[in-house]
Image (spheres, rainbow, N blue to C red):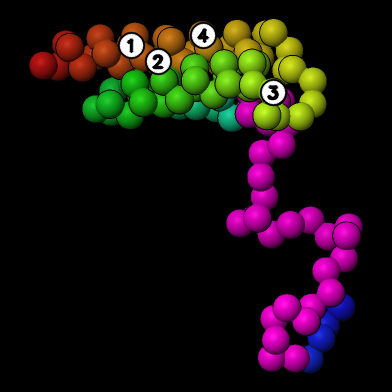
């Protein structure tokens, strides 16, 4: 609905409209686990970048464990295979990244 007003707060927001991209929040454990899998894959692919693969791997492991154990998120826990994939790729990315960094130095 369009309101002709200079006051931005005069707009009526519909309950069914999705929030704007800057107002979206992660709400479920499955969403955090999916992000952890993406960071794990990023850590494996970017192991050659100085520290990026290691940092992405640490973020992947931390976010997968957070999604699995925190009471702050809603929803059921993600499947064990997804959590194991996130933790596994994160650890592999850290190991390969540190190994590559040690080889270069």
Magenta segment range?
5-34
Q: Is residue 103 above or below residue 75?
A: above
Question: In the displayed structure, does residue 59 sit left or right of residue 7?
Answer: left
Quarter that holds the C terminus = top left
For marks 1 and 2, give the CA distance.
5 Å
Instruction: State whether residue 57 is above or below residue 74.
Output: above
Disc 2 or 3, which lies upstream in sequence?
A: 3
Q: What residue sits 83% from the left and 69% below the top? A: 13
Please report contact status of discs 2 and 3: CB closer than 8 Å, yes or no: no
Residue contact between numbered discs 1 and 4, judged by CB atoms under 8 Å = no
> Where is 80 relative to 19, above or below?
above
| Residue indicated by mark 4 | 88
**Any mark on residue 86, and which?**
none
Residue where numbered disc 2 is placed: 93
In the picture as drawn, the residue positioned furthest to the left comes out as 105
Q: Find numbered disc 1 in the image and state the secondary structure of the residue it sits on.
A: helix
Cα separation between marks 3 and 4: 23 Å
**Residue at 43% in and 10% down:** 91
Taking the image as shown, residue 33 lies to the left or right of residue 50, namely right
Q: What kind of element bears circle 4? A: helix
Secondary-structure class at tag 3: loop
Mark 3 highlights which residue?
A: 71
């Amino acid at each position: 609905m369009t309101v002709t007003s200079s006051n931005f707060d005069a707009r009526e927001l519909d309950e069914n409209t999705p929030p704007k991209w800057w107002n979206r929040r992660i709400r479920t454990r499955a969403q955090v686990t999916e992000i952890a899998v993406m960071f794990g894959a990023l850590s494996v692919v970017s192991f050659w970048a100085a520290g990026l693969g290691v940092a992405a791997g640490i973020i992947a492991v931390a976010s997968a464990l957070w999604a699995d154990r925190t009471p702050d998120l809603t929803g059921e826990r993600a499947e064990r295979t997804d959590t194991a994939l996130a933790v596994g790729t994160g650890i592999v990315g850290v190991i390969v990244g540190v190994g590559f960094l040690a080889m270069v130095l």
